Structure formats: structure tokens, C-alpha cells
Amino acid sequence: MNNLIRQIHRWLSIVFTLAVAATFIALGQKEPVVWVSYLPLVPLAVLFFTGVYLFVLPYIARLRSRN
């Protein structure tokens, strides 16, 4: 399970980077498409939750090893 979440986090970071680049390109046009600016929010939200999970993993493992 941890490896799956780690892989999802890695791939979503690439998707997020591409979405941010697409946003800069779209908003740099003469007539910008405003809805594109919301595109990076979806992968960012998932990145937040997977990142928090990966951040907390060592602390949970430490607590389990003490008991």
C-alpha cells in the first residue's frame, strides 16, 4: 500500500507540474481561458493528502515499534 501511494504521489507531481505549465501558457494568450487556472488544483489536492500520509509514516512506524 505504501509503495502504491508513493508512486501515485510521484506521478501526480509530474501531472501537477504539467498543469501549472499549461496554466502559464493558457493565461499568457491574448484572450486567456480563465478556467484553465483551476486545473492544477485537482492534482494539488491529491498531492497534499498523499504527502501528509507519506510525512506521517515514519512517526507511525516509530510509535508502533515502541509498543
Image: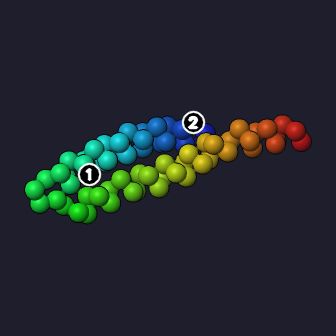
> Hey, what amino acid is under mark 2?
Asn
**Percent of width and height locating residue 23:** 26, 51
Say if mark 1 contacts mark 2, CB within 8 Å: no
**Lower position in the chain sequence, tag 1 or tag 2:** 2
Q: Label 1, label 2: how many angstroms apart (C-alpha)?
A: 30 Å
Image quarter hosting the C terminus: top right
**Percent of width and height locating residue 60:** 75, 44
Q: Observer-nearest residue: 30 or 16? A: 30
**Element carrying mark 2:** helix
Of circles 1 and 2, the one toward us is 1
Q: In this view, does 63 lie to the left or right of 38?
A: right
Q: Is residue 59 left or right of residue 23?
A: right
Q: Is residue 57 left or right of residue 20?
A: right
- Does residue 1 lie above or below 38 as drawn? above
Residue at x 11%, y 60% (from the top left corner): 31
Q: Residue beneath label 2, please?
A: 3
Residue at x 37%, y 46% (from the top left corner): 16
What label sits on residue 39 in the rendered view? none
Image quarter hosting the N terminus: top right
> Hey, what amino acid is under mark 1?
Thr
Q: Observer-nearest residue: 31 or 15? A: 31
Q: Which residue lies furthest to the left in this view?
A: 30
**Element carrying mark 1:** helix
Instruction: Tell me the crowding category of disc 1: few under 14, some 14 to 19, or many 20 or more residues within 10 angstroms, Cα based.
Output: many
Residue at x 74%, y 41% (from the top left corner): 59
Q: Residue beneath label 1, please?
A: 23
Q: Which residue lies furthest to the right in this view?
A: 67
Q: Residue furthest bottom?
A: 35
